[in-house]
Amino acid sequence: MNAPAPAVKKLRVATTSLAGCFGCHMSFLDIDERIIPLLDLIEFDRSPLTDIKHCGPCDLGIIEGGLCNAENVHVLREFRKNCKFLVAMGACAINGGLPAQRNHLDLRDVLEEVYQTDVGLSHGGIPNDPELPLPLNEVHPIHEVVKIDYFLPGCPPPADAIWKLLTDLLAGRTPTLGHGLMHYD
Amino acid sequence: MTDFSRIDAVLAHHDRNGTRLVQILREVQEQLGWLSPATLSYIAEGVGWPRAQVSGTAAFYSFFHTRQRGKYCVLWSDNITDRMLGNTDLMDAMCKKLWLEPGRVSEDGLVSVNTTSCTGMCDQGPALLVNYRAVTGMTLQRVDEMAELIRTEVPIAEWPAEWFAVQDNVRRTEILLAGNFAPGSALRAAHERAEVDGLSSSNNRSFRESLPHGIAGPMAMLDEIQRSKLRGRGGAGFSTRFKWEACRNAPLRADQERIVVCNADEGEPGTFKDRVLLTSYADLVFEGMTVAAYAVGATRGFLYLRGEYRYLLEPLEAVLARRRAAGLLGKSILDIPGARFDIEIHLGAGAYVCGEESALIESLEGKPGRPRVRPPFPVTNGYLDQPTIVNNVETFASAALVALHGGDWFAAIGTKQSTGTKILSVSGDVARPGIYEYPYGVTVRQVLADCGATDTLAVQISGPSGMCLAEDEFDRRIAFEDVPTAGAFMVFNTSRDMFEVARNFSHFFAHESCGFCTPCRVGTTLVRNIMDKIANRHGSPYDINELFKLHRLMQGASHCGLGNTACNPVFDTLNKFRPAYETRLMSLDYEPAFDLDAALSEARQMTGRDDAGAHFAAHSPDEANA
Amino acid sequence: MNETNTFLLDGEEIPFTPGQTIIQAATAHGVYIPHLCWHPEFKAHGSCKICTVKVNGRFGSSCTMAAQAGMNVENRSTELDDKRRTLLQMYFVEGNHFCPSCEKSGNCSLQATAYELKMVSPHFDMFYPDRPVDASHPDILLDFNRCIMCSLCVTASREVDGKNVFSMGGRGLLGRRIHISSESGKLADTDFALTDRAASICPVGVILPKRKGFAVPIGERKYDKLPINLQVTEETQ
Ligand SMILES: Cc1cc2nc3c(=O)[nH]c(=O)nc-3n(C[C@H](O)[C@H](O)[C@H](O)COP(=O)(O)O)c2cc1C
Ligand code: SF4
Ligand code: SF4
Ligand code: SF4
Ligand code: FES
Ligand code: FES
């Protein structure tokens, strides 16, 4: 009974923005000074908040944005492979959001319109540099491609909702959002 | 240019009565080929109905075209039994011959080729409809010849008559199919059964009330029906006596009359016995309806005939005319002045849900076939809010025999709870497909032996909405208390894949859902998509759980029997033929429904790229593991 | 009121007058039964099935089932709420619901019901259907991407406005939709008016007045203030 308390293992968290607007990450930062106590409990792996380029083994992966191109899919799969839990954060990750509004158009028409017909951009044709990720025929929410464990709706989700989700997870509770924290806009 | 004079003629024929809209739309389309926006406006104005209601109704029925259709419209019956007879290859061959994509009208507006739900020719498939005329026994040679006739624009009336021949294929007969029924004999027997009780009514409002025997006759008829313990043959097995009595006792308001409806929608895939009854035993059916009218006091009758059986319309009209001439229908039946009852035929237009009795009534009233909220039930508030009985074709045929021979005679046949006989429509992997009549209580095994089935893996009984039986259940009996059935008996031998059977049925339900209630409208499509996902080798155990979850939801929450039973084939095959699903699963982990690499196809095409970065590596289990 | 005219709803005794449906009795008593296609002013449609309850152990639609003395009705059980959530998810995948760009957001019954039932994702694969927007009318915009096929506009136009501007037609997931009473199919070619009851009945963001968008600031909208389950009595007024 007198053994020293084991050092609390910090929750390792990775975050990324796929086809999103960074709005959700901005909202994350809106938890303001609560980030300080939070950093006692979690440490960041790959994230726009760090400079780590590839996701290592993590407890939690938080994903903003849906899947618009091949690169998005690669990153999502990397997260799924390395994270114990994945959270879909924000409208775009959950239902495709604004980017998915292109889904009722044919991608070929979109590319043609943008790169060949439109006067402003038409020089040079459709870029075919192998360095560039190819766009998917349709935008997909992330749960259509990998299993997602938790969802955090909102565009963006309020900082308090993000805080609630994280503190619930840290405490080992199934995250819940009450009135005011749960909204889709 | 729309030919308004032809529309006017149709409208006049129907007294510009909006409740006859479905018939008006069908007849106008038969004249003009399709229902253009101007045609719909004209009809709406003609019947005085809101235009949105007319266009909304036209859009409900698969057989109505609100866009210009080809001069030739070919629809391949796509039941699993047609599939087993090779319809897919034949249809592909036809499309190739005609330079067509399925579902598209050719550029010259000549022809379109597509699929349709089971056309009720399962014992003589592969079958199709050409401009809504039934064709059976398609072969590669017929495909070639038909394509040639279409290309050279030979009118369908000049096509080989044998293509349109429909066989009865009656293989086993008992009381109904014995074929020795004398028109009028059942009515006379019913009429003569009652003692004269002096209760003759004076106002001659209906057949029943105007009979010299008064209401004693109808009462005696109902007693016979009760003694016969006749139950409905349309699937649910409801007591016929109970239904008829409720209708008879329902109060009539001024200007109302009681209605008898014969349900000949026969849309359940694999069912074709009503077609045979109406082809060769129509007198028995119409006489049963007239007996029912006598018992419940109805003066008006409808036969609701599925659009796929359009070719039966003229022969049936001829039978009705003959019966009128013989005093078995009309204004003074059996020469009793004022004893009146007549039957009118309404055609459906390609909607399985219209077999559901309240949807059928909506359709008779000129509306989309949307099942009503119940209660109230049709027996009190049916056709145009009048007391209405809806019974299956075979129920009426049986009722005629009850009238003729008495209830005790009938009840002695079959089992205690399931009296009389049942006609089975046998198709699939059997030597002798066709129509088999048995006393209730026959075992599935006996039927299989009689029709020459060998190596049987499964039998789908009562169609997709019924049940799928595996070998260890073949000693079960066809009876309401054991294996109830509306008649379909589709046999699958050990070379068949029960997953594909269930997948075919999931497509059927997604196509036929009326769309009224959410669980069925969306659920049937979700189930179909998951079945396709598994078929495309993208499935995982996660998807199997989803199927079970959708089954639990749709079974309880759907508005009508269609949604409630739509998952039955999936549920049964998941339980009884699970390996057929499991061998297709691609991984134990969640998998997307679509092929990721194919999702880059359009971008590859537009950029001309084909480097490694322009593809997703083949699925790596490592990557998918959480 | 006859004192025997009560039934149990999640264990609570609910009085009713004969002829009332379960949801009418519950609503009059201030108890929330989740629902979408039912509106207290009109006869029940019975299509959304969100109001599904268990009556003496059997599923039924509380908006169409008559209340009967002594019946035992289960409403907010985990089992029923799970089913309701799945039905809501069906709506969110069959249509295009991008709440951030929808003028109805915050005042929308579908959205508020989804909050109440703790729906955090659409769960199924999205259908992303191609549905039309009709901006032809000078005062009204129609965005059918959000239609839940409740038919309230059909009923309101027919019964209150006496106009029959709308009708629910077609079949199945792809076919079923609102038809508009004009040969062009455009709202501008009907006698629809902003003052029609049908113009304000839509529980979601399909029938929207033009130039009124986003008038109420976030935080002040109907369901920002109170969740839908606490606004039961208000709706019957
Ligand atoms: C989706 C659906 C389709 C149906 N199709 C038919 C049909 O084609 N023929 C039929 O007789 N009954 C059909 N029924 C059953 C009818 O609703 C009704 O129960 C039957 O016609 C009653 O007749 P019976 O009592 O003589 O069996 C169908 C029911 C459902 C739910
Ligand atoms: S269960 Fe299906 S067919 Fe029946 S009413 Fe609902 S949507 Fe229509
Ligand atoms: S209708 Fe309601 S649920 Fe749909 S997008 Fe608008 S606010 Fe969201
Ligand atoms: S437009 Fe609105 S009111 Fe009309 S059916 Fe659709 S959701 Fe209901
Ligand atoms: S990126 Fe956060 S809501 Fe769209
Ligand atoms: S509220 Fe009852 S079915 Fe919609």
Image (cartoon, rainbow, N blue to C red):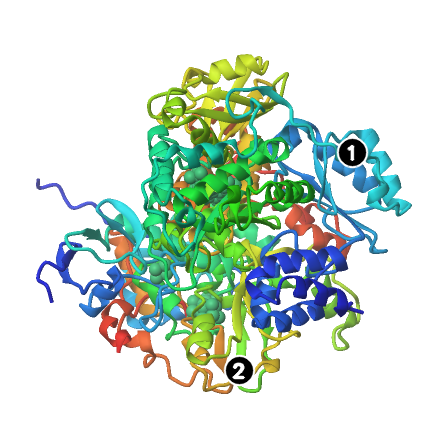
Q: Residue furthest right?
A: B152
Q: Quadrant of residue B56?
A: bottom right
Identify the image quadrant of the C terminus of chain B.
top left
- Could you tell me residue B567's position as x and y percent? 45, 39
Q: Secondary structure at mark 1?
A: helix
Chain label for disc 2: C
Q: Are marks 2 and 1 in contact (CB under 8 Å)?
A: no
Q: Quadrant of residue B218?
A: top left
Residue B163's label in the rendered image is: 1
Return the residue at label 2: C192
Any part of residue A147 in sight: no
- Label 2 – label 1 distance at C-alpha: 52 Å
Tell me if B602 is positioned left or right of C67 in this view.
right
Q: Secondary structure at mark 2?
A: loop
Give the residue drawn at x 41%, y 76%: C201
Tell me if C53 is positioned left or right of C200 in this view.
left
Q: Quadrant of residue B536?
A: top right
* Residue C113, placed above or below residue B114: below
Any part of residue B148 in sight: yes
